[in-house]
Image: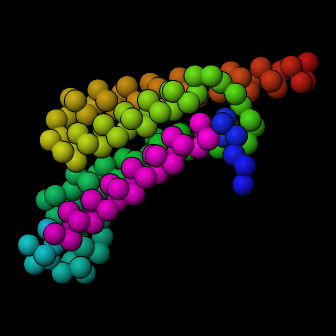
């Protein structure tokens, strides 16, 4: 398989974000199983989300895991669009890496000391980066589409 530098620069941030998601997933289960063992909670007692919320006190990793499946999904879709349409934007790779770095920092804050204002500011910054990425890609696609049909 040959992968171009452009493809690598698009795929690497997406793979890093997927890796972060799996790390948080693992932390979620370590946290959850540990609490279940300490509190002698039977698995069937957590059959629904509402039961889980009522019985488990440690939910930071689970909350962060769900968060990583929300807006980051738009990042993954954007990465696929950039790959499939071979969109070339010089700022894509550094901004994509910045987005992933901010998401990793958000996860560290969320799972770690969980200071809401710190978490919010990092979340907000990552969302702004994602909006800039989408804007750049949409602009480039619009330009290419207009040039080929006009």
Tell me the quarter of the image containing the N terminus: bottom right
Rendered view: 96 above or below 89? below
**Residue 39 location, x and y as percent?**
8, 73
Residue 22: within the magenta?
Answer: yes
Residue 36 is left or right of residue 94, and the answer is: left
Question: Which color scheme does this rendered protein use?
Answer: rainbow
Tell me the quarter of the image containing the C terminus: top right
Q: Residue at x 30, y 43 (%)?
A: 107
Residue bounds of the magenta highlight: 8-34
Residue 23, by quadrant, is bottom left
Residue 141 is left or right of residue 108, and the answer is: right
Name the residue furthest front: 2
Residue 81: within the magenta?
Answer: no
Q: Residue at x 20, y 34 (%)?
A: 116
Q: Residue at x 44, y 24 (%)?
A: 128
**Residue 149 location, x and y as percent?**
90, 24
Query: Exactly how many numbered labels are in the figure?
Result: 0
**Residue 99 location, x and y as percent?**
44, 32
Front residue of this view, candidates 98 and 48: 98
Name the residue furthest left: 39
**Residue 114 location, x and y as percent?**
18, 41
Magenta residues, dominant SS class: helix
Front residue of this view, candidates 3 and 34: 3
Q: Residue at x 27, y 59 (%)?
A: 27
Residue 3 shows in the view = yes
Residue 54 shows in the view = no
């Amino acid at each position: 398989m040959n992968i171009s530098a452009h493809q690598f620069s698009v795929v690497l941030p997406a793979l890093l974000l997927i890796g972060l998601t799996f790390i948080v997933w693992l932390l979620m289960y370590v946290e959850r199983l540990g609490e279940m063992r300490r509190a002698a909670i039977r698995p069937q007692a957590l059959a629904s989300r509402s039961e889980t919320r009522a019985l488990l006190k440690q939910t930071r990793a689970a909350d962060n895991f769900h968060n990583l499946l929300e807006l980051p999904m738009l990042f993954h879709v954007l990465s696929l669009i950039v790959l499939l349409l071979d969109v070339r934007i010089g700022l894509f790779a550094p901004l994509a890496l910045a987005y992933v770095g901010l998401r990793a920092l958000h996860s560290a804050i969320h799972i770690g000391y969980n200071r809401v204002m710190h978490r919010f500011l990092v979340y907000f910054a990552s969302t702004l980066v994602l909006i800039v990425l989408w804007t750049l890609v949409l602009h480039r696609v619009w330009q290419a589409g207009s040039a080929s049909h006009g």
